[in-house]
Image: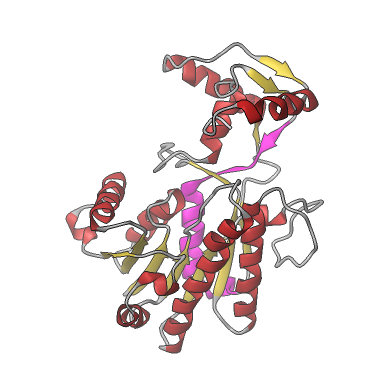
Amino acid sequence: MNTYFITGATGVLGSAIVKELLSNPENRLVLLVRAENELVLQKRITELLSFLGVGEKTRDRMDFIRGDVELERFGLHPGNFIKLGDQVTHIIHSAASVRMNYSLERARLAAVTATEHVLQLARLSRKNGLLQKMEAVSTVGVGGRYYGALPEQWLNTPRNFHNTYEQSKAEAEIILKTEVDQGMPITVHRPSMIVGDSQTGRILNFQIFYYLLEFITGRRTWGVMPDISDRHVDAIPVDYVARAISWSSKNPETIGKILHLCAGLENITSLENAEKLARSKFMKMNLPVPHKRVLPVAQFRFLVNSVTPFLPRKIR
């Protein structure tokens, strides 16, 4: 029996990983769930089980722990943390805060500090002779403003970043590389923009791509939008990413490697096509779609910078 410790299980990717792993009856899952109290914990557990459609027999292979990756030992009692290290054979660290506007200090807490705390458990499990693999979810965003094709390699090239999310994730990879050099069996996964299931479109909750659709259809900007012709986005179905991570967790050949989980140039999504499809779907749902007023990117940027300071915080 494999015992997987999973962070971020109630997130978009984490929930898909849980579904994938539960398909193997030899897997037992220990899920770390952040919750202010037991009531919130039970609510999140219920929502996850309902989304996954988990039956009672499968539920018996799932244990839930209330804790926080940003806290030392996840906020657990030392004895409980030690017991965890006596059980875990695999670790999947998928917890993340996908916010682009955090301060660097706050972003580092969610990415760097959280990674350090997960590695504490990995070292304990390895010391006990149990740890087989650790999968760490990063992002292709660690390339920042890297020029050219981003290699599936550890990066040490000096570069600038678009936001604190990218920078903090890149710093977390530096810590992971140090552990790999010391023999820790880690694989790093760099997905692009994750969207819903490839067959059903289902997703636990909306995140970046879905807000992007609101913007490129003008629903968030009163119809005023930048020219998106010849613009693309690399989007990847969540079930594909989950299958790749599950496969890697059982494959020692991926130890020390970087895996890019992306659509790539051959399969990237045209924003123009996405906009047309989204407008059509919104109108079929009787959701208002304003008339488009397209501006050159430079003019749109000037307009946004001019009006943003006067808008309510949520709109900003």
What is the residue that sits farthest to the top in this orientation? 291
In depth, the one of 199 and 194 nearer the eye is 194
**Residue 287 visible:** yes
Residue 119: percent from left, percent from top? 50, 75
Q: How many numbered tags mark residues here?
A: 0
Look at 40% across and 39% down and name the residue there. Answer: 202
Q: Indicate the position of residue 309 as horizontal and vertical percent values.
A: 65, 30
Image-based side of 167 in relation to 18, left or right? right
Residue 272, horizontal then vertical, whole percent: 66, 25
Q: Is residue 12 above or below residue 74?
A: above
Residue 140 visible in image? no
**Furthest residue to the left?**
56
Magenta region: which residues? 231-255
Judge by depth and name the residue closer to the eye, 66 or 229. 66
Q: Residue at x 50, y 66 (%)?
A: 114
State whether residue 215 is above or below residue 152: above
Colouring scheme, one of rainbow, by chain, secondary structure, one colour: secondary structure
In reply to whether residue 175 is colored magenta, the answer given is no
Q: Which residue: 80% across, 27% down?
A: 298
Q: Which of these two is toward me, 54 or 157?
A: 157
Residue 314 as seen in the image, left or right of residue 296: left
Q: Which corner quadrant of the image does residue 66 belong to?
A: bottom left
Quadrant location of the C terminus? top right
Q: Quadrant of the N terminus?
A: bottom left
**Foreground residue, 136 or 175?**
175
Q: Is residue 249 in the magenta section? A: yes
Main SS of the magenta part reads helix
Q: Position of residue 248 (x, y in %)?
A: 51, 66
Q: Residue at x 54, y 62 (%)?
A: 109
